[in-house]
Amino acid sequence: MTNPYGDVELTPRDIRALAHPTRLAILARLQQHGPSTATALAPEVGATPSVTSWHLRHLAGHGLVRDAQVASDGRQRWWEAVGRGFRFTPSEDETGRDAAVLLSRVVFDQARDLPDRWAAEAEPLLEDDWRASAGLSNTRIVVTSEELAEVEAAIEQVLAPYVLRKSEPDVVPGARSVRMLRYVLPEAATDEGEPA
């Protein structure tokens, strides 16, 4: 983990393993809500406890989840996410690119309804100060690939202290969890090399 957030850096093999909707949902639940068991996760991810357990072991084999050290009666195995997030870069070879495209599509599919759910369920309950800071921006910038990498690095440096902050409410009074969706979608070039 060498990035500012401490995210797990996925190898091409890890990317392919995570590009499964149930595995991605399991990992997301563990990252957001902390340690859990296969039995508790199962209804949240739409699988049986035995299927959920199988996926957890598969994720553990790729270093994405591990046994959690929690007080329990020992009858159930508790799991936790290794990092708060993950990241991946498509590799140069076709197999690596295909795996990255597959995982990207699964991530997009699972995030697709987040804004609608937030608008229906959370926004109506927000206090005025939180509502004033909420919302979305849709900004188009004109940059080179090197400049885009610099912009991304700068954003990560600004966000890193908040991403790494403990999530317990008593750590920072008045703080609450905020999801920031950031899509970086470069346009394809035309035959002339200009953006489409």
Image: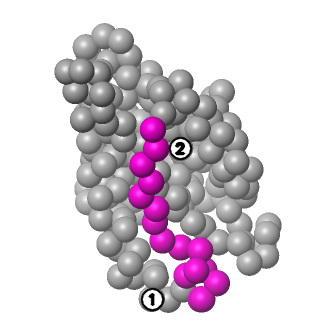
Q: Residue at x 29, y 58 (%)?
A: 112
Q: Provide residue 57's location: percent of width, then percent of height.
A: 40, 37
Query: Real-space Cα distance between discs 2 and 1?
Result: 28 Å
Q: Is residue 71 magenta?
A: no
Compared with residue 127, is residue 185 higher up or lower down, i.e. above or below? above
Left or right, residue 125 beside residue 196? right
Q: Provide residue 126's location: percent of width, then percent of height.
A: 54, 86
The label shown at residue 62 is none
Left or right, residue 24 beside residue 83? left
Label 2: few (<14), some or many (≥20) within 10 Å?
A: some
The label shown at residue 85 is 2
Q: Are marks 2 and 1 in contact (CB under 8 Å)?
A: no
Q: Provide residue 184's location: percent of width, then percent of height.
A: 42, 42
Q: Amino acid at mark 2?
A: Gly
Q: Residue at x 57, y 38 (%)?
A: 152
Can residue 77 be seen here? The reply is no
Residue located beneath label 1 in the image: 124
Nearer to me, 67 or 177: 177
Where are the magenta residues, as a range? Answer: 127-142
Q: Is residue 139 magenta?
A: yes
Outermost top residue:
93
Compared with residue 155, is residue 190 higher up or lower down, i.e. above or below? above
Q: Residue at x 53, y 52 (%)?
A: 31
User: Dot 2: what SS?
Assistant: loop
Can residue 115 be seen here? The reply is yes
Label 1: few (<14), some or many (≥20) within 10 Å?
A: few
Left or right, residue 12 beside residue 126? left
Q: Amino acid at mark 1?
A: Pro
Of marks 2 and 1, the one in the foreground: 1
